[in-house]
């Protein structure tokens, strides 16, 4: 059965899904642990029918997503003290906070060493570590943007400028004025997931909304985007 991509909006939630038709009597909907959604429908129905079917199941899908997410380790509240684990590019590092001659942050052998010049406090450690994350985000996001932009070279999208912000509810956004904004938190997930967000925002310069055309373009430039998106969702706090 050949599967197609589509998506619907359910409240504030975007529900992307794959669907296909086969010799069967009823509709079947499944939500997989990577949070992807598949719909199988009997022959004789069309894409519109599938959309209204998925819309009717919106509540059920969002509950299923939540259930899957409950199995994921939740990030505890950060206190910025030695022994705590912090993520960088998808890896876990143990924090070491110490006092020294100069302020510095180093990532070395599984540890994030935060050295503070003044008396080391957790507020001080947080400021230094956030600064370190931001400096690395700036460099790595720019590098990934160039890589992803290269993959859409056929689409002739002008290279957007990059902005990094602390955002609460989204990984990234785009403005048609030619800018992509990325959540600073993205520096904590693997590069393949960072690439997903950048590629996604880049594709919006070509197709504004999450229409089937949009997902088809994503599929073309990043055939394994669903896997990456599933992985990224595991990092959502
Ligand atoms: Zn989007």
Image: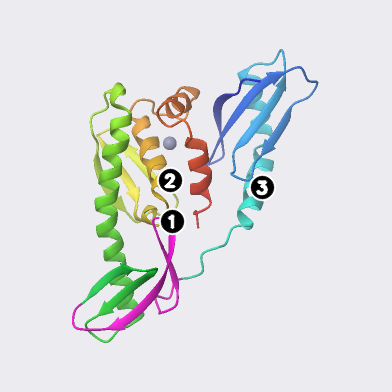
Asked where in the image residue 2 lies, by quadrant, the reply is top right
* Neighbours of disc 3 within 10 Å: few (<14), some (14-19), many (20+): few
Tell me the element at label 3.
helix
Residue at position x 69%, y 42% in the image: 60
Whether the residue under disc 2 has CB within 8 Å of ligand 1: no
As drawn, the residue found furthest toward the left would be 101
Which is nearer the N-term, disc 1 or disc 2?
Answer: 1
Q: CA distance from mark 1 to mark 2?
A: 9 Å
Asked where in the image residue 9 lies, by quadrant, the reply is top right
Left or right position of 55 against 236: right
Figure colour scheme: rainbow
Q: Which residues are magenta?
A: 78-102
Whether the residue under disc 3 has CB within 8 Å of ligand 1: no
Q: Quadrant of the N terminus?
A: top right
Asked where in the image residue 218 lies, by quadrant, the reply is top left
Q: CA distance from mark 3 to mark 1?
A: 26 Å
Q: CA distance from mark 2 to mark 3?
A: 24 Å
Residue on which disc 1 sits: 90
Which is nearer the N-term, disc 2 or disc 3?
Answer: 3
Residue on which disc 3 sits: 63
Residue on which disc 2 sits: 193
User: Against 187, is 157 above or below?
Assistant: above
> Where residue 139 appears, x then y in whole percent?
24, 51
**Cβ atoms under marks 3 and 1 closer than 8 Å:** no
**Closer to the observer: label 2 or label 3?**
2
Residue at position x 58%, y 32% in the image: 17
Whether 86 is among the magenta residues is yes
Tell me the element at label 1.
loop
């Amino acid at each position: 059965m050949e599967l197609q991509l589509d998506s619907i909006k359910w409240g504030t939630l975007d529900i992307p899904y794959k669907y296909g038709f086969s010799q069967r009597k009823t509709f079947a909907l499944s939500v997989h642990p990577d949070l992807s959604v598949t719909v199988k429908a009997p022959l004789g129905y069309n894409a519109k029918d599938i959309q209204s079917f998925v819309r009717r199941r919106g509540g059920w899908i969002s509950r299923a997503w939540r259930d899957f997410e409950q199995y994921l380790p939740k990030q505890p509240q950060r206190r910025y003290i030695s022994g705590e684990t912090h993520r960088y590019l998808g890896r876990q590092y143990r924090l070491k906070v110490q006092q020294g001659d100069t302020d510095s942050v180093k990532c070395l052998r599984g540890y994030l060493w935060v050295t503070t010049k003044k008396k080391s406090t957790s507020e001080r450690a947080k400021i230094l570590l956030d600064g370190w994350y931001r400096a690395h985000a700036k460099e790595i996001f720019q590098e990934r943007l160039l890589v992803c932009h290269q993959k859409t070279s056929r689409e002739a999208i002008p290279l957007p400028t990059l902005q990094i912000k602390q955002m609460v509810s989204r990984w990234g956004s785009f403005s048609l004025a030619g800018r992509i904004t990325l959540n600073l938190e993205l520096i904590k997930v693997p590069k393949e997931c960072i690439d997903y967000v950048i590629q996604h925002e880049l594709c919006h310069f070509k197709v504004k909304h999450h229409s089937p055309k949009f997902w088809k373009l994503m599929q073309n430039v990043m055939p394994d985007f669903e896997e990456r998106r599933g992985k990224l969702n595991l990092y959502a706090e």
